[in-house]
Image (spheres, helix red, strand yellow):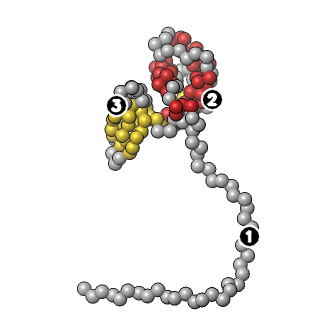
Amino acid sequence: MNLQGIVAVSGKPGLWRALAQNKTGYVLESLDAQKTKLIANLSTAKLAALNEITIFGLEDDIKLTDVFGRMKDAANVPAVKDDGKKLREFFYIVAADHDEEKVYSSDIKKIISWFHILKDMPLFSEEAPAAPVAEEAPAAEPVKEEAPAAEAPKAKAKKAPAKKA
């Protein structure tokens, strides 16, 4: 899934797509039906990119993208307004090794609501762009230094005359 440019803004419900960046922050557009635009000032608003969010795990942190992938494969994802126990049971299916003491029910509700926002979007089905990796080129043959063939001498660059003030 390609969650590049999708952010959560602290204090604002829902998810936002980063459209552009200016000197003071980002221009964001909501992913809901209203397509509300917002200018998030970096000095006051806290933005969290979805592709960088992790969930507390018992041993290692769990990437949100991995949880979304398991949720996409799950038979039926509960609604956000379902019982807290039912949500926690579902979350044990998609993130079995999450830390129950650090992952609150409000966090689970938020993750499930984000999933319901994203699940029908085309970007949720497309592959994430691969990180730029330097491709290994086949080893080039070593260049042998040869005596240069008789080259014409290069003309010297002329200096511009100094201007008098």
- Residue 89 x %, y %: 58, 14
Task: Identify whether 35 is placed above or below 160.
Answer: above
Q: Relative to the observer, which residue lies in front, 33 or 40? A: 33
Query: What's the CA distance linking mark 3 and mark 1?
Result: 59 Å
Residue at (58, 24) in percent of width and height: 72
Distance between the alpha carbons at the discs numbered 1 and 2 = 48 Å
- Secondary structure, mark 3, is loop
Image quadrant assignment for residue 31: top left
Q: Which residue is mark 1?
A: 142
Query: Which of the two labelled residues, at mark 3 and mark 2, occupies the earlier sequence position?
Result: 3
Judged left or right of residue 43, residue 134 is right
**Sequence-first disc among 3 and 1:** 3
In this rendering, the answer to whether 150 lies above or below 18 is below
Task: Please tell me which residue is depicted at 37% across the width and 30% down the height of the picture.
Answer: 35
Please report the residue visible at 59 percent of the width from the left and 37 percent of the height from the top.
127
Identify which amino acid the numbered label 3 is placed on: Thr
Horizontal arrangement in the rendering, residue 10 relative to residue 50 (left or right): left
Could you tell me the amino acid type at mark 2? Glu
Disc 2 designates what residue?
59
Tell me the quadrant of the picture where the C terminus can be found.
bottom left
Q: Residues within 10 Å of mark 3 (few under 14, many from 20)?
A: few
Residue bearing mark 3:
36
Report the mark closest to the observer, 3 or 1.
3
Q: At numbered mark 1, what does the secondary structure look like: helix, strand or loop?
A: loop
The image shows residue 140 at horizontal and vertical percentages of 72, 65
Q: First in sequence: mark 1 or mark 2?
A: 2
Placement of the N terminus among the 4 image quadrants: top right
Q: Amino acid at mark 1?
A: Pro
Q: Callout 2: 10 Å neighbours few (<14), some, many (20+)? A: few
Estimate the x, y position of residue 14 in percent, counting from the top left. Answer: 41, 26
Between residues 151 and 81, which one lies in front from this camera angle?
151
